């Protein structure tokens, strides 16, 4: 049956959706959530059905298509497409099995990840998979199989030589160790291709921060050229479809505030496996307001990472670090990028905590190769000699240097309400305030921290300064900070 296309001029941002008028839906016995195969010339795509009650939105005889479907089919407004009824994906049965508490095998998990990757599942169906995995958990074999399925349904990059990698599970604002460790490791002669994420819930991801200095959305060919030239890269992994199902799962997890343990491990290990990393250092920050807030949970996660790594043929070292407060002085893409470059320049005013943690992690990675007995000394010498800065500048030039960004012109000092010592800093509160100010989309937005845990504070002394690129966003962030500054002073 043929329908004329109605361009909805909207992007769904995820699934492939087609809207049909209620009159046509009744005639074809279609219901919301059913699947139809939409064809144009030699191209075809499976779409999830939605129904319009209004003749104005989608008239009878027309099929409302969103931007993702239009682009996939290379079809435009008022052109004719053919539709056929089709069944729901087989993976829905597997999702139901997981909801019932059954263990899934590799083939079943591959079905699910393939359908997620190719947008055959609605957000509701993906949510049920996440909920089933969260409620019933994933056993070790399921985590391994999910990791392999995520890799199988995306691209895989291979680089010559010994490939090292590191990852932090997140939860600590300002934790931009990757951008310091990467040039140190590359300057030592090892390959480290960092494919990083953009922020979903944090003030900035590594990709957001690196984008203040260099282009990060590179093609597979370009990434290989950069790594061949510099032994390293710091790019956005989503641009090259490495374990793409993972990014789509994370997007659904975000509004639910769910981070299922098994999916977290599979997510991290799939990205590392996708770039053929053999030596991987995993950072688990532990703190009152992080993803992992007690030692028992941290040790359990550490064991799972090591077991999965062993099964995948990877040498994995896991460290549990202090996640009790933000790291560095800057919170937000540009402010964090300035912290990173200050450390690499050996600036005496560079944040000592960021420098210390980066050197510690770089030293562990160097020792994991078996080529260094004293990794700490080697990492320190590479940083202090200027070799790490030189390597970072090479990486920036190879990826494509960005024009300088500017800090937000709208600023506000958040002050202490009393005299005392900083006893605690709430990572979640700091994150919310920074995002209200405009991070990570506004590169110049964020917070500059003047005080950390243990510092003395005078009454009315500045705890941090807020930066925003618009007055509205600054006022919104200030209003949130007035409810909770994020600091406990005793």
Image (cartoon, rainbow, N blue to C red):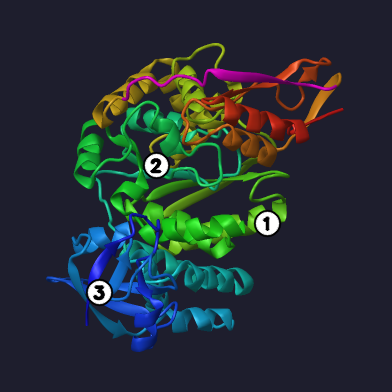
Query: Is 323 situated left or right of 9 in this image?
Result: right
- Residue 139: horizontal and vertical position, in percent? 55, 72
* Magenta region, residue range: 402-417
Question: Tag 1's secondary structure?
Answer: helix
Q: Nearer the viewer, residue 129 or 325?
A: 129
| CA–CA distance in space, label 2 to label 1 | 28 Å
Total labels: the figure holds 3
Query: Is 105 situated left or right of 287 in this image?
Result: left
Q: Which residue is mark 2?
A: 369
Q: Is residue 389 magenta?
A: no
| CA–CA distance in space, label 1 to label 3 | 47 Å
Question: Tag 3's secondary structure?
Answer: strand
Q: Which residue is mark 3?
A: 38
Quarter of the image with the N terminus is bottom left
Q: Answer with mark 3 or mark 2, whichever residue precedes in sequence.
A: 3
Q: Residue at x 51, y 27 (%)?
A: 336
Q: Which residue is mark 1?
A: 297
Q: Residue at x 33, y 61 (%)?
A: 66
Q: Nearer the viewer, mark 3 or mark 2?
A: 3
Quarter of the image with the C terminus is top right
Query: Is 299 situated left or right of 201 in this image?
Result: right
């Amino acid at each position: 049956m043929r329908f004329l296309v109605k361009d909805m001029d909207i992007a769904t941002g995820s699934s492939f959706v087609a809207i049909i008028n209620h009159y046509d839906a009744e005639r074809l016995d279609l219901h919301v959530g059913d699947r139809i195969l939409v064809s144009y010339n030699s191209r075809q795509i499976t779409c999830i059905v939605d129904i319009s009650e209004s003749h104005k939105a989608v008239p009878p005889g027309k099929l409302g298509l969103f931007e993702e479907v239009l682009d996939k089919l290379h079809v435009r407004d008022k052109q004719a497409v053919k539709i056929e009824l089709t069944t729901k994906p087989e993976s829905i049965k597997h999702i139901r099995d997981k909801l019932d508490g059954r263990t899934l095998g590799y083939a079943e998990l591959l079905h699910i990840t393939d359908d997620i990757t190719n947008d055959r599942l609605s957000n509701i169906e993906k949510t049920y998979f996440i909920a089933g995995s969260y409620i019933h958990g994933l056993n070790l074999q399921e985590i391994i199989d999910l990791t392999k399925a995520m890799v199988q349904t995306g691209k895989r990059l291979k680089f010559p030589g010994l490939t090292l990698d590191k990852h932090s599970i997140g939860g600590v604002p300002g934790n931009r160790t990757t951008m310091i460790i990467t040039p140190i490791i590359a300057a030592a002669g090892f390959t480290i291709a960092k494919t990083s994420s953009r922020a979903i819930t944090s003030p900035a991801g590594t990709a957001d921060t690196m984008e203040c200095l260099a282009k990060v959305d590179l093609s597979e060919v370009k990434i290989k050229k950069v790594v061949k030239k510099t032994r390293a890269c710091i790019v956005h992994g989503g641009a090259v479809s490495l374990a793409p199902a993972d990014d789509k799962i994370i997007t659904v997890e975000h509004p639910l505030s769910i981070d299922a343990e098994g999916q977290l491990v599979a997510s991290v290990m799939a990205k590392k496996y996708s770039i053929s990393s053999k030596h991987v250092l995993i950072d688990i920050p532990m703190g009152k307001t992080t993803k992992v807030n007690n030692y028992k949970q941290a040790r359990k996660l550490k064991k799972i990472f090591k077991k999965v790594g062993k099964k995948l043929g990877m040498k994995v070292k896991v460290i549990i670090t202090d996640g009790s407060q933000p790291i560095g002085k800057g919170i937000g893409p540009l402010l964090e990028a300035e912290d990173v470059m200050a450390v690499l320049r050996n600036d005496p005013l560079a944040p000592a905590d960021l420098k210390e943690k980066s050197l510690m992690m770089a030293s562990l990675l160097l020792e994991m190769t078996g080529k260094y007995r004293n990794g700490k000394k080697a990492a320190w010498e590479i940083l202090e000699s200027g070799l790490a800065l030189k390597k970072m500048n090479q990486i920036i030039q190879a990826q494509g240097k960005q024009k300088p960004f500017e800090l937000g012109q709208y600023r506000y000092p958040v002050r202490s309400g009393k005299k005392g010592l900083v006893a605690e800093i709430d990572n979640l509160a700091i994150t919310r305030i920074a995002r209200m100010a405009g991070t990570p989309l506004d590169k110049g937005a964020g917070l500059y921290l003047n005080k950390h845990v243990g510092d003395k504070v005078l009454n009315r002394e500045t705890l941090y300064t807020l930066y925003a690129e618009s007055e509205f966003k600054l006022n919104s962030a200030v209003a949130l900070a007035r409810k909770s500054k994020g600091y406990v002073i005793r």
